[in-house]
């Protein structure tokens, strides 16, 4: 991993973990895979987009998922987001379905969630890369230490923030992050919005209105969830 690629606001939090052997092994493993002709999503230059669009000092909400979309043209470095003009994957369609039920916001035409990111919603996966067509293929390769450090940096602040943990991979972070459960924060847990699990407790959790209520109660401006891009 290249520390120069880390946005300035995140460097102090991430440089120690990036200097560890695990991160160096991850970087070498990714380069070897690409050299062998493997297709890895998202492409180089987009893997840290979540950190670039949402500086640490502006984070209000963390939405945490599992890993990037593993189909061509979908992953763009923001969890659950796809570039403009790309068909919305089922997980994102379910997120928008819950948004409409929760807040009365009609399903956006675009699946690009950059507007959320620019408002302070850190759209982070536990793994930040994936091999083409192989969901979960980069789990356990070293990204977890890096994304743990991202979540821990937000949780370490006294500024109240919301952590929305979708799925078992995301929820596993709660036990590993100091102050996540006992700090001044709101933690919202539910199954992943994937069609495989959404009907087991994702729908009806009202994460968007609950997040905004917590932010307002703590003197922070709410997220305009309808402004996705």
Image (tube, rainbow, N blue to C red):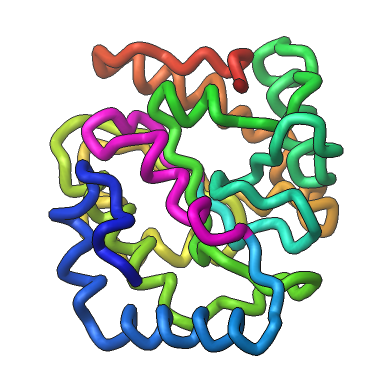
**In front of the other: 179 or 66:** 66
Along the viewing direction, whichever of 182 and 164 lies nearer the viewer: 164
The picture quadrant where one finds residue 3 is: bottom left
Q: Residue at x 19, y 31 (%)?
A: 159
- The percent position of residue 7, horizontal first and vertical second, equals 28, 46
Residue drawn where x is 26% and y is 87% of the image: 21
| Quadrant of the rendering where the C terminus is positioned | top right
User: Looking at the rendering, in which quadrant would you find the N terminus?
Assistant: bottom left
For residue 206, above or below residue 189: above
| Above or below: residue 4 compared with residue 58 | below
| 142 drawn magenta | no
Location of residue 204 (image quadrant)? top right
Q: Position of residue 181 (x, y in %)?
A: 30, 51
Q: Is residue 163 left or right of residue 202?
A: left
Q: Residue at horizontal 42%, vertical 86%?
A: 28
Q: Is residue 56 magenta?
A: yes
The range drawn in magenta is: 42-63
Looking at the picture, how far across and down is residue 51, in whole percent? 37, 45
């Amino acid at each position: 991993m290249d520390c120069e690629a880390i946005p300035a606001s995140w460097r102090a939090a991430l440089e120690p973990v990036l200097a560890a052997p695990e991160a160096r092994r991850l970087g070498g493993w990714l380069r070897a895979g690409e050299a062998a002709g493997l297709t890895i999503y998202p492409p180089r230059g987009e893997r840290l987009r979540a950190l670039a669009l949402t500086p640490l000092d502006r984070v209000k909400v963390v939405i945490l998922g599992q890993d990037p979309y593993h189909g061509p043209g979908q992953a763009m470095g923001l969890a659950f987001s796809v570039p403009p003009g790309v068909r919305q994957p089922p997980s994102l369609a379910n997120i928008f379905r819950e948004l409409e039920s929760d807040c009365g916001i009609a399903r956006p035409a675009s699946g690009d969630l950059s507007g959320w990111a620019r408002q302070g919603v850190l759209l982070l996966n536990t793994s930040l890369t994936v091999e083409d067509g192989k969901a979960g293929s980069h789990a356990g390769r070293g990204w977890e230490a890096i994304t743990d450090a991202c979540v821990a940096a937000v949780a370490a602040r006294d500024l109240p923030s919301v952590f929305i943990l979708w799925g078992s991979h995301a929820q596993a972070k709660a036990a590993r992050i100091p102050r996540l459960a006992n700090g001044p924060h709101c933690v919202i847990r539910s199954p992943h919005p994937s069609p495989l699990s959404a009907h087991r407790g994702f729908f009806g959790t009202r994460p968007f209105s609950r997040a905004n209520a917590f932010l307002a109660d703590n003197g922070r401006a709410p997220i305009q969830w309808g402004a996705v891009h």
